[in-house]
Amino acid sequence: MDWLNVFGLIMIAVIMIPNIIFAIRCKEGFENKWSNKFVEVAEQIGRFGCFGFMIINIPGTWFGWWSDEAFTIYLIVDTILVILYCAIWIICFKNSSMFRALALSIIPSAMFLFSGIMSRSILLVIVSILFAPSHILLSYRNAK
């Protein structure tokens, strides 16, 4: 089952937990204060691409980890980033701030890009490069 990255699936599932809780508790949703269709579309393509390619390895575009040590580093770094992401959600849940907006956009962006590089997933690197700047920019603009 080289096509399925169970660890990536777990990482995605864990970072979705605070987002789901937020969506349930804040039924009015998220107000997008800055509208830029190009950036919004780029972010959504990048987001769903990152989710997909963290979990599914497309043969010929994914070459696996360089070594067992690289895989271990991937697991350690991604686990730290996921814990940090969840901790910031918990600590800053009720306080909307620039710090929260940027931290919660930079951490997953870094995780997706790092994961793509470490797993040598061409598609994950490409979509994370699309996702990161658009997600960070939208988060910044909406936090202003």
Image (tube, helix red, strand yellow):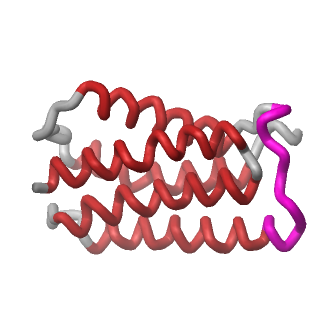
The quadrant in which residue 121 appears is top right
Tell me what residue is drawn at x 63 percent, y 53 percent.
10
State the quadrant of the N terminus: top right
* Residue 65 vertical placement versus 127 (above, below): below
Left or right: residue 88 versus residue 53 is left
* Residue 85 vertical placement versus 36 (above, below): below
Q: Is residue 68 magenta?
A: yes
Q: Is residue 125 magenta?
A: no
State the quadrant of the C terminus: bottom left
Q: Position of residue 54 (x, y in %)?
A: 64, 45
Most foreground residue, 39 or 108: 39
Most foreground residue, 11 or 71: 71
The quadrant in which residue 34 appears is top left
Q: How many marks?
A: 0
Tell me what residue is drawn at x 61 percent, y 35 percent.
52
Q: Position of residue 130 (x, y in %)?
A: 47, 40
Magenta residues? 59-71
Q: Position of residue 36 (x, y in %)?
A: 21, 31
Left or right: residue 2 versus residue 16 is right
Residue 27 appears in the picture as rendered: no
Q: Position of residue 47 (x, y in %)?
A: 46, 38
Tell me what residue is drawn at x 61 percent, y 60 percent.
114
Residue 138 appears in the picture as rendered: yes
